[in-house]
Image: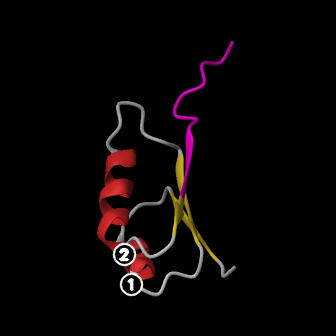
Amino acid sequence: MKQLKNQISVIIPNYNRQELIGETIENMLMQTLPPREVIIVDDGSTDGSLSVYRDWETDRKSVVEGKS
């Protein structure tokens, strides 16, 4: 049986949490078993959160933008 390795996905919902989102992403990527992907779902933030996501350099990140 093939061992599944690094098969965790993390979904982070966000709305105007610029001061926390960078640390949250960093903490997810530094886990003992880092996630295969980090998906950030933004609900129309207006505080600069999007610039924090975009500045984060990783190939395991996806950003979903929307407004409710």
Q: Can you say whether 24 is above or below 41 in the image?
A: above
Q: Residue at position x 60%, y 25% from top?
A: 4
Amino acid found under the numbered disc labelled 1? Gly
In three-dimensional space, the C-alpha distance between marks 1 and 2, rounded to whole angstroms, equals: 7 Å
Q: Can you say whether 1 is above or below 50 in the image?
A: above
Q: Can you say whether 1 is above or below 46 in the image?
A: above
The colour scheme applied to this rendered structure is: secondary structure
In the figure, residue 55 lies in which quadrant? bottom left
In the figure, residue 65 lies in which quadrant? bottom right
Q: Residues within 10 Å of mark 1 (few under 14, many from 20)?
A: few
Tell me if residue 15 is in the magenta stretch: no
Q: Residue furthest bottom?
A: 46
Amino acid found under the numbered disc labelled 2? Val
Residue, disc 1: 48
Residue 30 location in percent, x, y?
Answer: 32, 43
In the figure, residue 40 lies in which quadrant? bottom right
Residue, disc 2: 52
Q: Residue at position x 65%, y 18% from top?
A: 2
State the extent of the magenta-drawn residues as a range.
Answer: 1-12
Q: Residues within 10 Å of mark 2 (few under 14, many from 20)?
A: some
Residue 15 vs residue 28, the one in the foreground: 15
Tell me if residue 9 is in the magenta stretch: yes
- Residues under numbered marks 1 and 2 in contact, where contact means CB atoms less than 8 Å apart: yes
Name the main secondary structure of what is drawn in magenta.
loop
